[in-house]
Image (cartoon, rainbow, N blue to C red):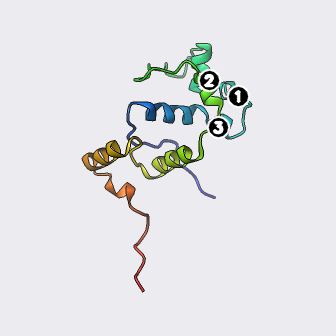
Amino acid sequence: MGYQGTYKSFPVEADEHLLTVLCYVERNALRAGLVARAEGWRWSSLWRWRHGEVLEDVPALTEWPVERPRQWLLQVNRPQPKGELEALQTSVQRGRPFGAKLWQAMTAESLGLESTFQPRGRPRKDR
């Protein structure tokens, strides 16, 4: 049986790529089949945003550095495109920067994350 760490971190470009990550996070309970609609998961940031609920033992939500789109609930409740989901999951698993290609390359270089773009494991021997 394997366990995944509670927290993952990777650099994210603060534009539509950040919205993609936020959508992915707020869609978690829906993707796991725990609710019929993402905003139905009472323990999510989406629930708290939607209902304005303040919980005593949970820190308040901070403002996002990008504006939440008008049709956010519609966007969160739509299935995430396969390619987008795969790119996001790779960033989560590898700590790879998530953003435009040029931004990814510059960020990886400045933070020493070039290895996140290399295949895992030992290189295959040439025969």
Q: Is residue 67 above or below residue 107?
A: above
Which label sits on residue 79? 3
Which label sits on residue 73? 2
Q: Is residue 106 above or below residue 16?
A: below
Residue 65: name its quadrant: top left
Mark 1 or 3, closer to the camera:
3
Quick one: which residue is furthest to the bottom in this view? 127
Q: Is residue 118 above or below residue 71?
A: below
User: Quick one: quadrant of the N terminus?
Assistant: bottom right
**Residue in front for this viewpoint, 79 or 53:** 79
Mark 1 or 2, closer to the camera:
2
The residue depicted at 59 percent of the width and 42 percent of the height is: 81
The residue depicted at 43 percent of the width and 68 percent of the height is: 121
**Mark 2 or mark 3: whose residue is earlier in sequence:** 2
Asked whether the beta carbons under mark 1 and mark 2 sit within 8 Å of each other, the answer is: yes
Which label sits on residue 37? 1
Amino acid carrying label 2: it is: Leu
